[in-house]
Image (spheres, grey):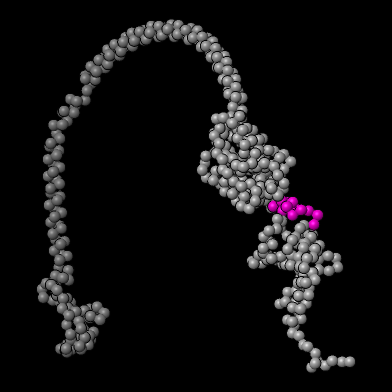
Amino acid sequence: MQTSFHSATILSVSDVVRAARDRLEQAFTDVWIEGEVSGLRAPGSGHLYLTLKDAQAQIKAVIFRGVATRLRFGIQDGLSVVARGRLTIYEARGDFQIVLDVVEPKGLGALQLAFEQLKERLAREGLFEESRKRPLPFLPRRVGLVTSLRGAAVRDMLTVLQRRCPAIGIVIVPVQVQGDGAARQIADGIKRLNAAKLVDVMIVGRGGGSIEDLWTFNEEVVVRAIAASRVPVVSAVGHEIDTTLADFAADYRAPTPSAAAEAVAPVLSEVIEGLNQLESRLVRALQGRLAGYRHEVAGHQLVIQSMRLRFQRVAQRLDDRLEAAKSAMQTLLAAHRLHALKVHHGLRIASPAGWIRDRLVVVPQFLKRARQGIAAVLDRKQLESRHVLRALGGLNPLAILARGYSVVFRVRDGHVVKSVSDVVADEEILARLHEGQLVCTIRKLLPQG
């Protein structure tokens, strides 16, 4: 028997998809699934979209932001996981998918995977390099403790510090060491000690516990705060077998909080004893060195005494030689003085001064004759100059203008007008006079005759 579509119930696409979704969600509310992550997408909403697949099939999956933020490890393509969720259908696209509420890495705990992932990433940045680690101060003035006030760790550290070196000051920054917000408190405590500049070294740590209890010291914010600290940091987390990322970033890793206190605080009595021993050794060394210096000085004194006697003998011989040289110089000077007197007397006899005086008598006569000759030459030259000036004056065209004549130029080109044919009526001309110039307009041209 056939049923026509007129009598059948016709559903919309939305109705069909919604009915299938409801049946699917009722039947598969709690499903455990195993598969390999593929096609991971992480948009800005914070949700994660991926595909879980095995050798024969695949299914789309979504991890909403609330669950994604609680994951201890980073999901990545190729990672095999075991997850729990509920099956559903995304109506807008009709996609069959699973909404995941729990995700664990297969074969490796989530915390351990997160530990390895963060360790690898921070190691690539160089935060764990040995070259970054600084030596601890030998005898710090003050030690900072970033830890909880409730655990046995702080009491153990205080006991060891007071026993080994009571002179060391202690600054405690109380923080939570596990639970929500503990990592931020520890990082802030490290930064506060750096900013205050009160301590020479700090211990960051707590007592033992499970990996979950110690996980705060694997948080990235704590590791980066330790690596960025200007003050040397000693990590003291848990027991000797416990290892955290804080241990890798710290300048020194102590197996226990008590061992950390021993690392930063020397035994004061041993320091004092060592200083006393060094003082004794220094005194003995100085005494031996002084004895050696005294022996050397005594030897030098003998040498100096011997040299003083030698210098005195040399000085006496120098005095004798100076006296002899002085007597010889006086004798030599007397002989040269006598020779100079003889030479002076001879020069006076042969002096040209008399010959010069005789010749100076005729000098005034020669000067008079020279002056007369020069005066006659000057008179003659002045007379010749006057004749030349008069001749030049006759040739000067300006002299002609002084007698009433003028020179006429065309204004348009500056040419001298020599004939009426050189100008036209109504043309302007320039007439240069003996004194000044005239600009004239030609009213009429009159031919010669």
Say which residue appears at 12% left-offset and 40% top-offset.
368
Q: Quadrant of residue 144?
A: top right
Closest to the observer: 48 or 374? 48
Q: Is residue 225 visible?
A: no
Q: Quadrant of residue 247?
A: top right
Say which residue appears at 78% left-offset and 65% top-offset.
30
Residue 177: x and y, percent? Answer: 63, 46
Residue 357: x and y, percent? Answer: 16, 28
367 lies left or right of 207: left
Say which residue appears at 27% left-offset and 14% top-offset.
337
Q: Quadrant of residue 23?
A: bottom right
Residue 62: x and y, percent? Answer: 72, 67
Residue range in magenta is: 106-118
Residue 117 in magenta? yes
256 shown above or below 77: above
406 shown above or below 278: below
Q: How many marks?
A: 0
Closest to the observer: 59 or 136? 59
